Image (tube, rainbow, N blue to C red):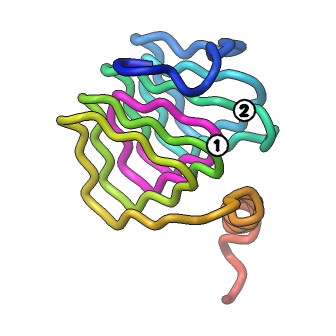
């Protein structure tokens, strides 16, 4: 998306979070989500087949991110789970572990955490989403 050959088709934007917008709480989406602003909470794709997230250079997420397709050029403070394709552009900054099936990383992108390859990542993505949702619902329950 930000350089080189484009391997995924054009990303359709169904939802846009503008640069002056700030969201507190978990965000669940379908289709295409483009974030220019700030999200304080987990970002979860509910449509695990075709959901795509684009985080622009000025965008920021403080929480876990779960989506099959991601193009990140902003900052994520939390773990990232991409079951299909993860593209990290030159200004991408991730402070957390990255779980991916296919990773494309531009010069200048930064990951402060583990890179964990997951072949056929869909089941893990669904399991991780369920864990995050269950943790939100049952956070007072004993482990």
Residue 68: image location, x then y, percent: 66, 43
- 7 to the left or right of 114: right
Residue 15: in magenta span: no
Badge number at residue 141:
none
Q: Looking at the image, do the residues carrying marks 2 and 1 touch, with CB atoms under 8 Å apart?
A: yes
The residue at the point 65 percent across, 37 percent down is 27
- Read off the residue under disc 2: 51
Q: Give the range drawn in magenta.
A: 62-81
Determine the CA span between mark 2 and mark 1: 6 Å
Badge 1 density bin: few <14, some 14–19, many ≥20, Cα 10 Å: many
Badge number at residue 67:
1
Residue 76: image location, x then y, percent: 38, 43
Quick one: 108 or 59, which is closer to the camera?
Answer: 108
Report the magenta stretch's main SS: strand
SS at mark 1 in the image: strand
Q: Please, is residue 112 above or below residue 135 in the view?
A: above
Residue 63: in magenta span: yes
The residue at the point 23 percent across, 45 percent down is 110
The residue at the point 67 percent across, 64 percent down is 128
Q: Which of the image's four quarters has the N terminus?
A: top left
- 50 to the left or right of 66: right
Quick one: 9 or 90, which is closer to the camera?
Answer: 9
The residue at the point 50 percent across, 41 percent down is 86
Quick one: 91 or 46, which is closer to the camera?
Answer: 91
Quadrant position of residue 13? top right
Q: Please, is residue 110 above or below residue 101 in the view?
A: above
- 139 to the left or right of 126: left
Quadrant position of residue 137? bottom right
Q: Which of the image's four quarters has the C terminus?
A: bottom right
- 49 to the left or right of 106: right
Residue 34: image location, x then y, percent: 55, 19
SS at mark 2 in the image: loop
């Amino acid at each position: 998306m930000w350089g080189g050959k484009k391997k995924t088709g054009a990303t359709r934007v169904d939802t846009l979070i503008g640069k002056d917008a700030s969201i507190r709480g978990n965000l669940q989406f379908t289709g295409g989500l483009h974030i220019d602003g700030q999200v304080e909470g987990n970002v979860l794709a509910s449509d695990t087949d075709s959901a795509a997230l684009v985080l622009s250079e000025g965008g920021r997420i403080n929480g876990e991110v779960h989506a099959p397709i991601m193009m990140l050029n902003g900052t994520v403070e939390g773990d990232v789970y991409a079951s299909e394709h993860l593209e990290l552009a030159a200004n991408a900054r991730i402070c957390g572990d990255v779980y991916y099936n296919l990773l494309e990383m531009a010069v200048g992108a930064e990951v402060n955490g583990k890179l964990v390859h997951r072949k056929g990542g869909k089941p893990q993505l669904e399991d991780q989403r369920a864990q995050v949702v269950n943790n939100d619902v049952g956070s007072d329950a004993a482990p």
